Image: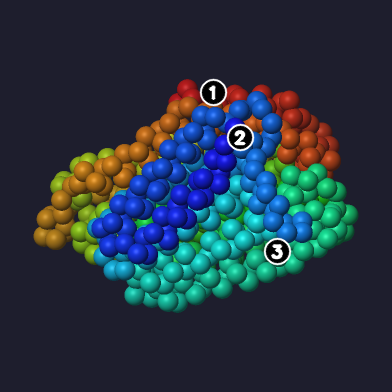
C-alpha cells in the first residue's frame, strides 16, 4: 500500500491528544474514544491488508530528516501483531475510565492518547534513534498516569517506575551510538544483517539487556512492577500489563537475537537462569498476596519469564510460542485487571479477604472472571495454552532442566489463580456491602466480552496469529543459526535444537493440537 497508514495511525491519536487539552471532560472522553476506535479500524485494515507471503517489511514509509536520521516506518509480522494488540486494548481502556476517572479528565485522556502514539511508534520504527525516542518517551505519559491519577502511594510508585526504566535505557543509547558509527547507518533492517565483532557483541548485548530486562521486567529488576500496578488506575494497569511490558520482549526479538546472535548464544545461561528463578519465585510470592492487583502483577513477571526462555531457545517453537504468550498475556492480564476494577468500583478495596460469594449476586461477572482465570492458567482452548505449550516445547529441546522448572511455575500459577477465584467468587457472602454489589453493567460487558472473544479465538484458531509471524521467524532463525547454543536435551546431536524443517512441522502440529482443543 502506498497510503501512509502507519503515519495516519500515529497522527490520529496525537491530534486528538492535543485537542483533548482544550475540551470539557465529556467532550474529551468522546474525542479519545472516537480517536482510539479510528485507530482500531485502521489496525483491522493493517491486519487484513498484510501479505503473509510477501516482503518481510511492509507498509514502509521513509522521509529523510537530517543526517542519517529519518522518519522511517514499516512493520513485519511481529510488529503487526503487537500494534493490533495495542489498538485493540486502547478503546477498552478509555471505556474503563469513563466513570472511574473524574479528576482532570482532559489531561488524563490526552496522556492515554499519547501513550497509544508512542506504543505504535515503537513497534513501527525502522530507524534506530526513532525507535529510541518512541521507546523512551513512553515513560512520560505512564509516569503522569500513575503519579496523578494513582492511589495513595502513587508518587513513590511513579518515580520508581520512571527511574528503573530510564537508567536501564541509558546504556542502550550509548550502544546505539556505537552501532550507528560502526555500521554507518541507523536503519534497523540494515543493522539486522550487519555482523558486529563477537567480542563487541557481548558489550552491546549487555547494554540492550539492561533496558529490556527492566521493561519485561525480569527478576531481580521487577520490583517496580507490583508498586506501579497497585497504584495505577485500572486502565493504567491494563495498558501497562497488556502492551508496555511487551516492549522488552519485542526488543529482545528485534535487536538482541538478530543483531548479536553470538552474544545471545553465549549468554543464554544468564537469561535461562534469571527466567527460571522468576517463574518459581514470583509464583510463590503471588500465592501469598492479599491484594488482587499485586497477585496479578507478580503473575505477569512469571508469564514474561516464559517469554524470555522461549525467545532464547533459538528455535521456531520457542520464538513463536513467546510471541503467542505475549499476545495472550496482553489480553488476559488486561481482562483480569478490568475484573479487579469492576469490583473495586463497587467496594473500593482490593483486599481478597473482603470478598467472597460473588457468584450469588454477580453471576455474569463470575463467568467472565472464570474464563480469564482459566486462560491465565493455560487451559486448552484459551489464548495462553498454545503459547505456553510452544514455548516450553522449544525450551525442552535446549534444556530439559529449565523446561521442568518452568513447568513447575505453571503448576504454581494454577494454584494461585484458582485460590484467588475461590476466595473471591465462591463461599458465603461475608458482608452486607458485598451482598449489595450489582452485576456487570452494559458498559462493563462491552469492555470484557470483546476480550473474552479474542481469548477464545486465539485458543481455538491460533493459526491466524501464527501465520503472520512464521516467515519472519524463519528469517530470524536463518540469521541466528550459526550461533545456536548446545543444550542438555538434544533431538539432533550437536545442535541443541531441531532442524528448521522439523521445527516448522512441530509448530504446525502444535497449532493443530491447539485448534483441536
Give me the disc on residue 2. Answer: 2
Q: How is the image coloured?
A: rainbow
How far, Cα to Cα, is label 1 from label 3? 40 Å
Q: Foreground mark, 1 or 2?
A: 2
Q: Position of residue 402 (x, y in %)?
A: 65, 48
Residue name at image x 46 percent, y 72 percent: 158
Residue 493 vs residue 193, the one in the foreground: 193
How many C-alpha atoms fall within 10 Å of the one at disc 1: few (<14), some, or many (≥20)? some
Q: Position of residue 501 (x, y in %)?
A: 73, 25
Q: Position of residue 9 (x, y in %)?
A: 50, 46
Q: Is residue 377 above or below residue 513?
A: below
- Residue 258: tell me if it is visible: no
Q: Are marks 1 and 2 in contact (CB under 8 Å)?
A: no
Q: Would you name the residue on which mark 3 appears? A: 172
How many C-alpha atoms fall within 10 Å of the one at disc 2: few (<14), some, or many (≥20)? few
Q: Are marks 1 and 3 in contact (CB under 8 Å)?
A: no
Q: Foreground mark, 1 or 3?
A: 3
Q: Is residue 51 above or below residue 31?
A: above
Q: Foreground mark, 3 or 2?
A: 2
Q: Earlier in the sequence, mark 3 or mark 2?
A: 2
**Callout 3: SS:** helix
Q: Taking 271 as reference, is 197 left or right?
A: right
Q: Earlier in the sequence, mark 1 or mark 2?
A: 2
Quadrant of res 288: bottom left
Q: Earlier in the sequence, mark 1 or mark 3?
A: 3
Q: Taking 147 as reference, is 309 left or right?
A: right
Residue 67 vs residue 477, the one in the foreground: 67
Residue name at image x 57 percent, y 70 percent: 164
Q: Would you name the residue on which mark 1 appears? A: 512
Amino acid at each position: 500500500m502506498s497510503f501512509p497508514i502507519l503515519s495516519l495511525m500515529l497522527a490520529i491519536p496525537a491530534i486528538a491528544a492535543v485537542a483533548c487539552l482544550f475540551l470539557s471532560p465529556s467532550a474529551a472522553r468522546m474525542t479519545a474514544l472516537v480517536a482510539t476506535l479510528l485507530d482500531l479500524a485502521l489496525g483491522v485494515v493493517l491486519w487484513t491488508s498484510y501479505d503473509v507471503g510477501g516482503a518481510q517489511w511492509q507498509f514502509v514509509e521513509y522521509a529523510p530528516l537530517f543526517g542519517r536520521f529519518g522518519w522511517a516506518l514499516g512493520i513485519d509480522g511481529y510488529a503487526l501483531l503487537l500494534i493490533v494488540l495495542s489498538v485493540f486494548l486502547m478503546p477498552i481502556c478509555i471505556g474503563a475510565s469513563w466513570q472511574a476517572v473524574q479528576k482532570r479528565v482532559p489531561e488524563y485522556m490526552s496522556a492515554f492518547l499519547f501513550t497509544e502514539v508512542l506504543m505504535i511508534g515503537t513497534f513501527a520504527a525502522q530507524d534506530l534513534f526513532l525507535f529510541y525516542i518512541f521507546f523512551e518517551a513512553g515513560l512520560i505519559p505512564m509516569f503522569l498516569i500513575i503519579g496523578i491519577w494513582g492511589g495513595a502511594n502513587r508518587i513513590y510508585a511513579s518515580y520508581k517506575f520512571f527511574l528503573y526504566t530510564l537508567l536501564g535505557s541509558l546504556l542502550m543509547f550509548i550502544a546505539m551510538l556505537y552501532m550507528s558509527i560502526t555500521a554507518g547507518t541507523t536503519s534497523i533492517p540494515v543493522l539486522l544483517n550487519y555482523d558486529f565483532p563477537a567480542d563487541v557483541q557481548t558489550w552491546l548485548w549487555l547494554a540492550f539487556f539492561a533496558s529490556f530486562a527492566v521493561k519485561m521486567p525480569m527478576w531481580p529488576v521487577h520490583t517496580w512492577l507490583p508498586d506501579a500496578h497497585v497504584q495505577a488506575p485500572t486502565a493504567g494497569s491494563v495498558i501497562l500489563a497488556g502492551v508496555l511490558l511487551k516492549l522488552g520482549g519485542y526488543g529482545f526479538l528485534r535487536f538482541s537475537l538478530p543483531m548479536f546472535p553470538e552474544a545471545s548464544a553465549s549468554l543464554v545461561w544468564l537469561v535461562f537462569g534469571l527466567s527460571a528463578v522468576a517463574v518459581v519465585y514470583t509464583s510463590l510470592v503471588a500465592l501469598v498476596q492479599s491484594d488482587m492487583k499485586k497477585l496479578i502483577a507478580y503473575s505477569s513477571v512469571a508469564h514474561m519469564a516464559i517469554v524470555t526462555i522461549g525467545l532464547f531457545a533459538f528455535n521456531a517453537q520457542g520464538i513463536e510460542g513467546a510471541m503467542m504468550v505475549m499476545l495472550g498475556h496482553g489480553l488476559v492480564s488486561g481482562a483480569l485487571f478490568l475484573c479487579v476494577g469492576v469490583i473495586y468500583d463497587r467496594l473500593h478495596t482490593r483486599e481478597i479477604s473482603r470478598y467472597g460469594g460473588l457468584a450469588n449476586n454477580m453471576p455474569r461477572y463470575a463467568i467472565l472472571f472464570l474464563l480469564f482465570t482459566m486462560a491465565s492458567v493455560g487451559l486448552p482452548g484459551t489464548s495462553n495454552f498454545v503459547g505456553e505449550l510452544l514455548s516450553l516445547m522449544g525450551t525442552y529441546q535446549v534444556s530439559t532442566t529449565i523446561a521442568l522448572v518452568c513447568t513447575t511455575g505453571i503448576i504454581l500459577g494454577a494454584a494461585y489463580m484458582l485460590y484467588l477465584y475461590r476466595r473471591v467468587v465462591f463461599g458465603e457472602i461475608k458482608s452486607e456491602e458485598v451482598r449489595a454489589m450489582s452485576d456487570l453493567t452494559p458498559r462493563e460487558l462491552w469492555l470484557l466480552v470483546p476480550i473474552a472473544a479474542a481469548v477464545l479465538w486465539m485458543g481455538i484458531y491460533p493459526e491466524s496469529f501464527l501465520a503472520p509471524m512464521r516467515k519472519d521467524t524463519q528469517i530470524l532463525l536463518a540469521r541466528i543459526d550459526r550461533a545456536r547454543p548446545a543444550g542438555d536435551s538434544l533431538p539432533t546431536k550437536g545442535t541443541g535444537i531441531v532442524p528448521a524443517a522439523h521445527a516448522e512441522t512441530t509448530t504446525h502440529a502444535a497449532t493443530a493440537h491447539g485448534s483441536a482443543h
